[in-house]
Amino acid sequence: MNSDNNSKLVLPSNSSYLFANMKNVTEIDGLNKLDVSKVDSFEGMFAEDEFLLNADLSSFEPNQQKALNLSKMFYKDFRLHEVDISKFTNSDDNIENIFYRNNRLYQIKISGLDFSEDSGLDADSWINPNDEKENQSGFPQGGASVSTWNLKVSERNMSETFFSFGLYSNKDVMLKSNDLEDSEPSEDYSSMLASDFLGEKLFMGVLTVKKSIFSYVGQTITIQAPTVSGYTANPNTVKVKLETFNGDPNKIGAYELDVSESEKSFAIIKDGNRMEHNYTIYYTKNPAKVTPPTTHHTTTPTVTSKYTHKLQTLTTYPDQNSANIYDEDGNLSKTVALSPDSNWQTDEYMTIKGEKYYRVATNEFVKASDIYLYTPKYSVVRTHDGADYISLDNSHGDTVTNRALAVKTDWKIDKVIKINNEDYYRVATNEFVKADNVDVIR
């Protein structure tokens, strides 16, 4: 589907199974380019798209002056998580088996539809978190306005185990114990450090989050990073989302946790085995307190250092050779270099002969001229209208001459950088779009 064209594609009256059986598709772009006003049958439109995760049909404008056929619309979409069908407002629409075998579905956004009968939903315990009614539990039921319904966490499909997550740094440190699963997140972990711990960054092992703090799937909570005496955590909080449901929602089974979209992604620990480990909390040793000497004169103590402490993230330029590494005296390393387009955490920088250097490891520094600083941001942006195209810049701030973005198109971003003190979002390896030319849509 060409999502770059401003005109909309008018779908026929019978659009049954139009996007069905796309076995490896996780997301469908360009749905906002479809005109569905003439469609009478949406039957099976996305049926058996086994890897489809989300279906946002909020851009659809169906003809709701008559009843439409929505039966089997998401039939056997086993991995479907979230659906927005809020534009379908006619309570007479045929919704038979619309969600048949959607075992992992946990969020539905609706308005006029009632799913208490024939919808094929596996779970019968749903709540509207924005509704103040107590003891909600039942099938999603729409009304005059749009409402969001989430799968309720209930006793019968909860196990007594903990959710476990790994907190990792880029330098492993030996712990006295590898098993931290019985510890609360607020506990001071410094007692678990090995006696010979000398590093500035700390490998934290496992953090546990009790399931009892969640009331519905899709809920996001904020947890504190574990305390370590004498160290400062960055970040000191993490937003954790109860996201993916596994298996039959009416039986005891495991949910899965994920870090919210803006803070991807946390390490998932399952049955004691590490599955992912690309979320990091850094622990930096607090500076020693300076006590001024006792004199007859009142003076302000001054602490001098060649380093400035600041936690940041950086990337080596992708269009240059490997970035050289230097020691704290500015001497070139003959054994170590950083690969192009590689990401690194830095906690300090220094200046030698007017040139700034960022530390990426113990006594290893990279020149500021070989890298760019960035802030992680995992979102989707939509380009503005009103121009022929939206231009791109590379990481040096130079205009990309052979590529541009079409107007009113959506792009995933993962980084924010500063170019001439203005924000730019990364949409490809060395391509950035100016923040003023797009809207963040999710």
Image (cartoon, grey):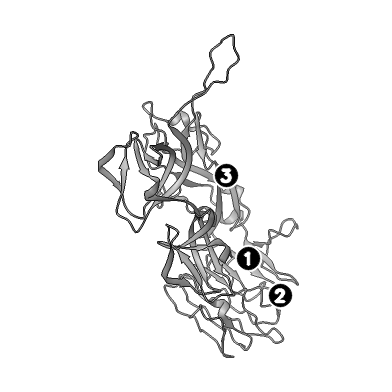
Helix, strand, or loop for circle 1?
Answer: loop
What amino acid type should be assigned to the residue bearing mark 3? Answer: Ile
Look at discs 3 and 2 and give the one toward the viewer. Answer: 3
Question: How many labels were placed on the picture?
Answer: 3
Dot 3 and dot 2 residues touching (CB under 8 Å): no
- 377 with respect to 169 (left or right): right
- Quarter of the picture containing the C terminus is bottom right
The disc placed on residue 223 is 3
Q: CA distance from mark 1 to mark 2?
A: 18 Å
Find residue 52 and report its horizontal and vertical position in percent.
Answer: 49, 70
Judging depth in this view, the residue of 286 and 122 nearest the camera is 286
Question: Of all residues shown, which one is farthest toward the bottom?
Answer: 13
Residue, disc 1: 124
What amino acid type should be assigned to the residue bearing mark 1? Answer: Asp
Does residue 341 show up?
Answer: yes
Judging depth in this view, the residue of 408 and 412 nearest the camera is 408
What amino acid type should be assigned to the residue bearing mark 2? Answer: Gly
Residue, disc 2: 112
Q: CA distance from mark 3 to mark 2?
A: 36 Å
Q: Is residue 209 above or below residue 79?
A: above
Give the mark, 3 or 2, whose residue is nearer the N terminus: 2
Judging depth in this view, the residue of 22 and 127 nearest the camera is 22
The disc placed on residue 110 is none
Look at discs 1 and 2 and give the one toward the viewer. Answer: 2
Crowd rating for badge 1 (residues with CA inside 10 Å; few <14, some 14–19, many 20+): some
Dot 1 and dot 2 residues touching (CB under 8 Å): no
Image quarter of residue 85: bottom right
Does residue 260 show up?
Answer: no
